Image (cartoon, helix red, strand yellow):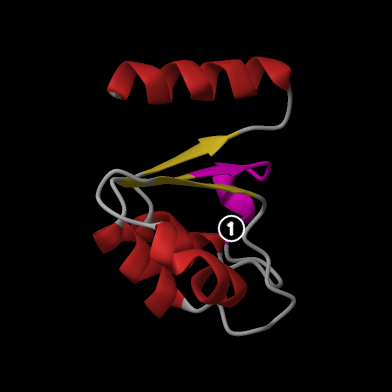
Amino acid sequence: MQTFHHDFWDAVDGKTSVLFIGDGRNNYNDPRLDIAELMKRGARRVLWFCPEPDYQWGTGDSDMHRYAPLAHGVFLVRNLRELGAAVDNVLADG
């Protein structure tokens, strides 16, 4: 999160969609929720494609339960079928 903010923040504006692909695990590092909040406010939308079901969020080093409210949408994506469904959902939502 911090690297994205440092290297690419100037590319984020009200026309930008930010897509995260990952499980939201931080190896017990600071999740930088402040940056995630800035992204939600600054981007058109923040979407997260996560391979872990929500019952695993918040276990171990997972911060996904903390990131989810800061995204406009979180989609379970573990295979091509789920990826297709997530993309269809995003496109239908505009």
Q: Is residue 88 visible?
A: yes
Residue 2, compared with residue 88, is above or below; it is below
Tell me the quarter of the image containing the C terminus: top left
Q: Which residue in the rendered view is the most extreme toward the front?
A: 10
Q: Nearer the viewer, residue 53 or 5?
A: 5
Residue bearing mark 1: 57
Which secondary structure, mark 1?
loop
Q: Pick the quarter of the image with the N terminus.
A: bottom right
Q: Is residue 50 left or right of residue 40?
A: right
Q: Is residue 15 left or right of residue 21?
A: left
Q: Is residue 1 visible?
A: no
Residue under the point 43% across and 55% down: 68
Residue that appears at 49% across and 61% down: 65
Q: Amino acid at mark 1?
A: Trp
Residue 54 is one of the magenta-drawn residues: yes
Identify the residue at horizontal 51%, vertical 64% (top origin): 8
Expressed as whole percent of the image width and height from the top left, the position of residue 61 reads: 69, 72
Query: Which stretch is magenta?
Result: 48-57
> Who's the residue at 58% across and 58% down the image?
57
Instruction: Give the number of callouts.
Output: 1
